[in-house]
Amino acid sequence: MVRLPHVPTIVAFVLAGIVVAVVPGGSDRIMAAEAQQAVRPRTVTVLVAGGHDTVVLDSYFPRHVRVRAGDTVVWKFNGDENHHLHTVTFSGGPFPGPKLALAGGVPGEALPDFWVPVPGGRPGELMWNPAEAWPTRQRGAPVEKYDGTTYAHSGHMRMNPLVAGMPAAREFSLTFTKPGLYRYACQLHAHMQGTIEVLPVNAKDVPSQEEIDRQAKAETERLLELIEKGKALAQNVRSQPGPNDTTFWYVRAGVFDRSAEMGGILFDFAPKELTVKVGDTVIWQATDTHTITFIPAPPPPILFDVRPRSDGPPFIVRNEQVWQPSKPTPVYDAAQYFNSGAIGIITPQGTSWALTFDKPGVYEYICALHHPMGMKGSITVVAR
């Protein structure tokens, strides 16, 4: 016996045929509409730095992002309120003032130099370079458009200003208008670099914000693992014999796993508390920029003097008591101010500073740049 198809099925089949007949190519139109919707400009978020207390994540999360032409990238500062400054800096075009070559960059890639002479100031008096301290986008102006031919800069990014009157921004945005691969860096930390790969407006192979967030989380966790590895390595206190039965002791100012990039750093002294004998010498070594500062009486010195102006942003003048070395005697004297100045791989003072101790006692010191984060140490001197 031959079974007839169920009537509703026949009706549905006939109606479907009518639809196809009435709207030829309907599926193509739907697909075209979906494609048009898929390439609308969007906004994606990248995190700047991270960490808490003395744990510092000097990186962009994620370091590499793919977007389409017309998309906007928003960088959001991700450290806590005491963390140090960062910038998002694209060096595609000219900017005023002195320049520094971008680490690992091609010829012509440059960032603004940190310091410039204070106009009308004392000889040797320096301030933050305004091209480096202040953003290229004026407050209230539209989001900057970037095609690789201009200088685009966030200014100093931080949860709060480092000192009253000093600039600080929590977000920075750019709209990318032209396909290309654009490298950017933190002006203040040469190892901190990222890339934005801009694809054509109709490109499909771009990550969603969810995928970007997953990559950011994976890179964050990797740096935290490296910090833990660096902590373990820093437990080994290094020393070597000195003259007349004394000892040279070595302290790291800042801890990171030396087998990897400096993206994950512990802003602390290692060891944080060191016991030596009378006549011994302590040698501090830094890669990132820090100070070793012994203060006879609080408070610690201010970092900058803010000088308001009526015709522009204030001058942020650095306090040379912090930035320059001070060693009134070769041997430590608790009644006087001793300071390494800023030491590290990008400073004129070099990467190390030494001090000899000849009186028993407990002597506390700080990094004058990062002590609000908890970067403090102590030297206990005992009789030989």
Image (tube, helix red, strand yellow):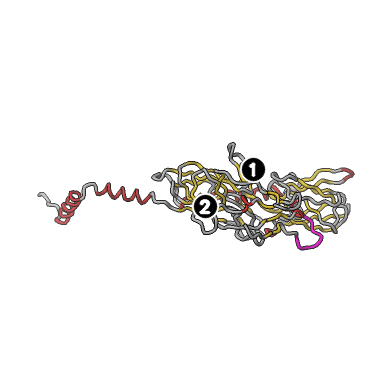
Q: Kindly report the secondary structure that dominates the magenta region of the rendered protein.
A: loop
Residue 127 at x, y = what percent?
Answer: 69, 52
What amino acid type is highlighted by mark number 1?
A: Leu
Residue under pointer 1: 100
Q: Residues within 10 Å of mark 1 (few under 14, many from 20)?
A: few
**Which of disc 1 and disc 2 is earlier in sequence?**
2
| Left or right placement of residue 155 versus residue 207 in this view | right
* Amino acid identity at mark 2: Val
Foreground: 187 or 223? Answer: 187
Specify whether residue 144 is in view.
yes
Q: Which residue is mark 2?
A: 46
> In front here: 92 or 193?
92
In the picture as drawn, the residue positioned furthest to the top comes out as: 107
Question: Is there any visible trace of residue 226 in the rendered image?
Answer: no
- Disc 2 is placed on an element classified as strand
Q: Residue at x 49, y 54 (%)?
A: 143
Q: Please provide percent x and percent y for residue 320.
A: 75, 53
Residue shown at the point (56%, 52%) measured from the top left: 136
Taking the image as shown, residue 347 lies to the left or right of residue 180, namely right
Q: How many marks?
A: 2
Bounds of the magenta segment: 293-300
Whether 297 is among the magenta residues is yes
| Quadrant in which residue 245 is drawn | top right
Q: Is residue 368 left or right of residue 55?
A: right
Residue 120 place in picture, x, y as percent: 72, 53
Which dot, 2 or 1, sits closer to the camera?
1
Spatial CA distance of label 2 from label 1 is: 25 Å
Q: In the image, is residue 298 part of the stretch drawn in magenta?
A: yes
Few, some or many residues within 10 Å of mark 2 (<14, 14–19, 20+): many
User: At numbered mark 1, what does the secondary structure look like: helix, strand or loop?
Assistant: strand
Which image quadrant is residue 6 in?
bottom left
Q: Which residue lies at the image location 49% right of the left edge and 47% below the top edge?
A: 146
